């Protein structure tokens, strides 16, 4: 080290300059060639005090939720008001649950109510543009991702107060006996790929304005939830917001989140359990005019002792890009330290860090002994967020690593998910299922849940969402319990007596013990018979059966129609299409399902048009700005890094040829 001192100033300047280049590429195109490419990234919104400038149109978001059993029905009302002097078109990008089946949209203009119609996406867009050009008020709801929507509202006249009402339903699936309803608060800024590396996709919706972190939005967010279950409720709480809970009896509860401008910058999370930590095991039936639907939920078996679990290999793939700077990366450090410390002596592990590039702790996975765990923790502690989010190259590198033995390989991806390569990531993982199981950890107050759940689903693993430091420690413990839980293998579904068809999923995957089995399908004829799930455990054969009875039929279960269609669309859209290649037949199937069941999909949209011509003025387009998710720094939208910490560390990084080589050299020198 002493021989390096004369060159330290020059090398530090070089390393610092390189680091600043990496950090300042966060959420911006690398080497953009045109002005259009520059705009395909988030940007900061600066509010003008000029009275001639159009004011922000979104004034409030009000959410009403009714939870009956395991089905949530949600109504989201967005109020837009034009306080300027010109006709406006408002564009607003907002999130939704990845499990949402969006089945209705209404537009309220004064006393008039316009019911939206489901249309093929291109047709809906054409009808909207025509209505806008004719001076009619219109609303268009489009799906950009299963968890990201864009609302366009045309011809909002000065003084207008227009309300757009969105209806969706979803199933609440318990984990470890706990139920959680999640309403995503805001779409986090997305890294839209690099022109130089060829990663990412060019999508216009990513071009979204964001408020600076010290600016409070003007629009308010409010929540009203009612719960009804046949089993007594207990332990109702929110880990995200302060709420007031009222219970009229043991089966009913209501809560309110008053309207506030600071409520909407993070996910709303409501958790509850049922008496005795029971899971609502059973079957729901719905009898419609032309089709009947059922859903069965079966609680999994109990855990076995840990000494019956085979040795495993874990590769932790950690995002250290600019959007992770601050709270997300600090939380990720807590999570990773805890998970590495929880490894069993018979396990092996490795750590990969990625941003614009990636590096690994060691060429091959190492035994989970005290020395190697200390080395990994020291590496984790020295990380600072900066650079772009090149997820695909990181996954490809991890998948190309040699397997040292016959251990069960498990990838643990830790990121906020602010990328636009979800489908490409699913494709890569799905095509390498024989190489690794994949678990995902979403870090932050408003993570990309579609990516997190999609990664886990494609890799036959599980997704965990962590919104704060305390949850990071708890999630690490849950992960340890989850992977050490027994699984049912070679699962089989047998339905006797009931004429069931179009069952989702078609095949049951191996199942860890913390989540129930959920099957949804259609039925004909008489409601009778039984549903049985069987499989192999470490103790031998196991099975569970439920009887079908006419008394289970209820009109309260009408949402099963939408939920079945959403599952079928997800199978086609998120998996079959991704991994078998897009073709006209698959697009037609998804489109037909959306049109038949009145559902928003990738290829269908909701369009509402008022028949009254209201203006001849051409409307100005206003992009509704979003708040940065709670805890996300301005680095996520390309702000400059104020300083570069620990200069000696980055000096050694540059000299040693990367993080992995640097750490190995430090280890050889017995430096801790």
Image (spheres, rainbow, N blue to C red):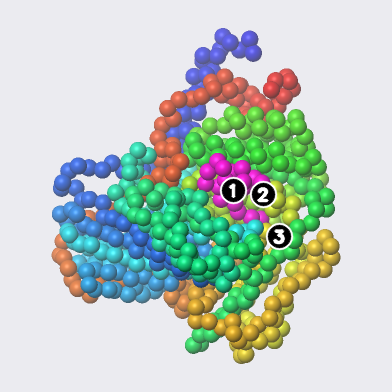
Taking the image as shown, residue 624 lies to the left or right of residue 533, namely left
Compare marks 2 and 1 and give the one earlier in the sequence. 1
Q: Is residue 189 above or below residue 283?
A: above
Q: Nearer the viewer, mark 2 or mark 1?
A: 2
Q: Is residue 156 above or below residue 124?
A: above
Q: Do the residues under discs 2 and 1 have CB atoms within 8 angstroms?
A: yes
Report the quarter where the C terminus lies.
top right
Residue 479, numbered label: 2
Number of marks in the rendered image: 3
Residue 643 x, y percent position in the rendering: 45, 25
Question: Residue at position x 36%, y 55% from top?
Answer: 258
Q: Which residue is mark 1?
A: 441
Q: Which residue is mark 3?
A: 513
Say few, some or many: other residues with alpha carbon within 10 Å of mark 1 (under 14 / 14 to 19 / 20 or more): many
519 or 403, which is in the foreground? 519
649 or 337, which is in the foreground? 337
Report the quarter where the N terminus lies.
top right
Residue 440 x, y percent position in the rendering: 61, 50
Q: Which residues are magenta?
A: 460-479
Taking the image as shown, residue 455 lies to the left or right of residue 120, namely right
Say whether residue 415 is visible.
no
Callout 3: helix, strand or loop?
Answer: loop
Question: Residue at position x 52%, y 64% from top?
Answer: 99
Q: Do the residues under discs 3 and 1 have CB atoms within 8 angstroms?
A: no
Residue 671 found in image quarter: top right
Q: CA distance from mark 3 to mark 2?
A: 12 Å
Residue 222 x, y percent position in the rendering: 37, 57
Residue 154 found in image quarter: bottom left
Callout 2: helix, strand or loop?
Answer: helix
């Amino acid at each position: 080290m002493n021989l390096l001192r004369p060159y330290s100033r020059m090398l530090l300047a070089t390393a610092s300059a390189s680091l600043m280049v990496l950090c300042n590429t966060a959420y911006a195109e690398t080497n953009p060639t045109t002005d259009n490419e520059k705009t395909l990234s988030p940007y900061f919104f600066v509010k003008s005090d000029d009275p001639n400038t159009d004011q922000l149109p979104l004034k409030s978001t009000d959410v009403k939720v009714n939870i009956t059993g395991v089905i949530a029905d949600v109504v989201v009302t967005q109020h837009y008001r034009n306080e300027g002097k010109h006709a406006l078109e408002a564009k607003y990008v907002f999130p939704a649950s990845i499990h949402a089946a969006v089945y209705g949209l209404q537009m309220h203009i004064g006393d008039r109510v316009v019911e939206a119609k489901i249309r093929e996406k291109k047709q809906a867009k054409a009808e909207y543009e025509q209505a806008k050009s004719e001076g009619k008020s219109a609303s268009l709801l489009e799906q950009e991702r299963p968890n990201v929507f864009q609302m366009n509202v045309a011809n909002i006249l000065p003084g207008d107060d227009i309300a757009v009402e969105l209806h969706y339903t979803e199933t609440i699936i318990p984990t470890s006996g706990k139920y959680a309803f999640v309403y995503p608060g805001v779409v986090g800024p997305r890294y839209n790929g690099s022109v130089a590396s060829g990663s990412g996709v060019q999508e216009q919706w990513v071009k979204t304005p964001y408020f600076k972190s010290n600016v409070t939005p003007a629009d308010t967010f409010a929540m009203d939830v009612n719960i009804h279950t046949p089993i007594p409720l207990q332990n109702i709480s929110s880990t995200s917001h302060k709420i007031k809970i009222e219970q009229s009896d043991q089966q009913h509860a209501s809560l309110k989140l008053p309207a506030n401008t600071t409520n909407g910058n993070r996910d709303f999370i409501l958790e509850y359990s049922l008496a005795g930590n029971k899971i609502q095991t059973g079957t729901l039936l719905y009898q419609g005019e032309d089709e009947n639907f059922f859903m069965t939920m079966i609680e999994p078996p109990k855990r076995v002792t840990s000494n019956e679990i085979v040795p495993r290999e874990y590769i932790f793939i950690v995002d250290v890009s600019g959007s992770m700077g601050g709270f997300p990366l600090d939380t990720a450090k807590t999570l990773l330290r805890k998970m590495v410390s929880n490894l069993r002596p018979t396990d092996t592990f490795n750590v990969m860090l990625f941003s614009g590039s990636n590096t690994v702790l060691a060429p091959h996975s190492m035994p989970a002994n005290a020395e190697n765990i200390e080395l990994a923790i020291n590496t984790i502690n020295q990380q600072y967020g900066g650079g772009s989010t090149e997820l695909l190259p990181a996954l490809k590198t991890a998948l190309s690593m040699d397997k040292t033995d016959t251990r069960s390989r498990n990838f643990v991806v830790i990121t906020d998910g602010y990328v636009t390569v979800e489908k490409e990531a699913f494709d890569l993982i799905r095509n390498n299922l024989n190489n690794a199981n994949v678990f995902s950890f979403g870090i932050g107050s408003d993570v990309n849940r579609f990516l997190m759940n999609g990664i886990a689903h494609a890799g036959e693993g599980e997704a965990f969402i962590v919104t704060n430091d305390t949850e990071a420690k708890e999630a690490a413990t849950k992960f340890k319990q989850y992977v050490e839980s027994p699984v049912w293998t070679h699962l089989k579904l047998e339905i006797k007596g009931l004429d069931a068809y179009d069952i989702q999923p078609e095949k049951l995957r191996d199942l860890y013990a913390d989540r129930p089995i959920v099957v949804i399908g259609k039925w004909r004829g008489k409601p009778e018979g039984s549903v049985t799930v069987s499989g192999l455990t470490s103790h031998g054969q196991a099975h569970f059966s439920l009887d079908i009875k006419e008394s289970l039929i209820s009109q309260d279960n009408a949402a099963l129609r939408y939920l079945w269609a959403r599952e079928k669309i997800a199978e086609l859209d998120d998996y079959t299409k991704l991994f078998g290649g897009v073709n006209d037949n698959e697009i037609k199937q998804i489109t037909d399902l959306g049109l038949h069941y009145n559902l928003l999909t990738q290829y269908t949209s909701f369009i509402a048009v008022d028949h009254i011509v209201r203006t001849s003025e051409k409307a100005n387009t206003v992009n509704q700005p979003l708040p940065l998710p709670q805890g996300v720094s301005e680095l996520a939208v390309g702000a400059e890094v104020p300083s570069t910490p620990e200069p000696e560390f980055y000096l050694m990084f540059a000299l040693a040829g990367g993080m992995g080589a640097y750490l190995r050299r430090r280890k050889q020198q017995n430096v801790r």
